[in-house]
């Protein structure tokens, strides 16, 4: 089964079984909502424990959660430094807007100019706040940084792993 990280369990919080989570998802409200089911991977463990969120709240830069049936620090201590993940099936239930994609769908896509020239392959995605910026590695090893904005990105076909962009002056320098 394919898994996708949604949070890192940083530490426990208090003695009532709360865990301090550093979110790694854009869907915090859904992933950490009461009743959500997540796969909890203990540190260095390959097999998940399925958990259900029984409480969730923001605290500073973290999300504090408790799992159903684990309202005691002794029961959640083993999850410290672990990961919370969702399966591919759970991702399929998300309703993405048009022109919204998961990072894993964009990574490894080939990027072409409107003229059909291969520019490179998306190797990383940087979240800048205003818009994402794609790191595109050319065949010669040079890296280009392509902002994900309407004026530049003209077409995305995740099934074919192909992206077409408008190359503005100075974009690839």
Image (cartoon, rainbow, N blue to C red):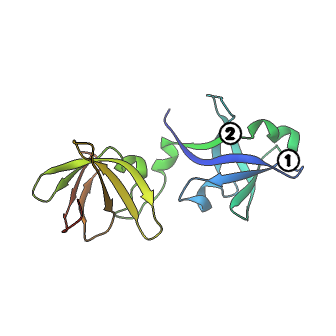
On the image, numbered disc 2 is attached to which residue?
Answer: 82
Q: Which mark is residue 71?
A: 1
Which residue: 25% across, 71% down? 151
Which residue: 66% across, 58% down? 33
Q: Could you say whether the residue bearing mark 2 is in a helix, strand or loop?
A: loop
Which circle, 2 or 1, is nearer the viewer? Answer: 2
Return the x and y of residue 101 as percentages of the image width and height: 39, 56
Apparent side of residue 167 relative to residue 16 in the rendered image (left or right): left
Apparent side of residue 157 relative to residue 102 in the rendered image (left or right): left
Return the x and y of residue 123 as percentages of the image width and height: 36, 46
Comparing 86 with 163, the one in front is 163
Which residue: 82% across, 43% down? 70
Up the image or down, 42 lies above or below 97; here it is above
Return the x and y of residue 161 as percentages of the image width and height: 27, 46
Q: Which mark is residue 159?
A: none
Pick out the residue farthest to the left. 115
Q: Where is the C terminus found, in terms of image quarters?
A: bottom left
């Amino acid at each position: 089964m394919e898994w996708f990280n949604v949070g890192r369990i940083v530490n426990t919080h208090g003695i009532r079984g709360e865990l301090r989570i550093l979110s790694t998802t854009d869907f915090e409200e859904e992933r950490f909502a009461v009743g959500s089911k997540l796969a909890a991977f203990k540190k260095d463990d390959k097999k998940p424990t399925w958990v259900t969120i029984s409480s969730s709240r923001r605290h500073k830069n973290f999300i504090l959660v408790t799992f159903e049936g684990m309202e005691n620090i002794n029961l959640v201590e083993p999850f410290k430094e672990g990961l919370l993940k969702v399966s591919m099936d759970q991702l399929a239930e998300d309703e993405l807007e048009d022109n919204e994609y998961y990072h894993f769908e964009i990574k490894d896509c080939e990027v072409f100019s409107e003229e059909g020239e291969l520019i490179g392959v998306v190797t990383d995605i940087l979240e800048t706040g205003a818009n994402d910026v794609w790191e595109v590695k050319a065949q010669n090893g040079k890296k280009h940084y392509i902002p994900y904005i309407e004026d530049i990105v003209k077409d995305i076909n995740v099934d074919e792993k192909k992206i077409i962009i408008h190359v503005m002056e100075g974009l690839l320098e």
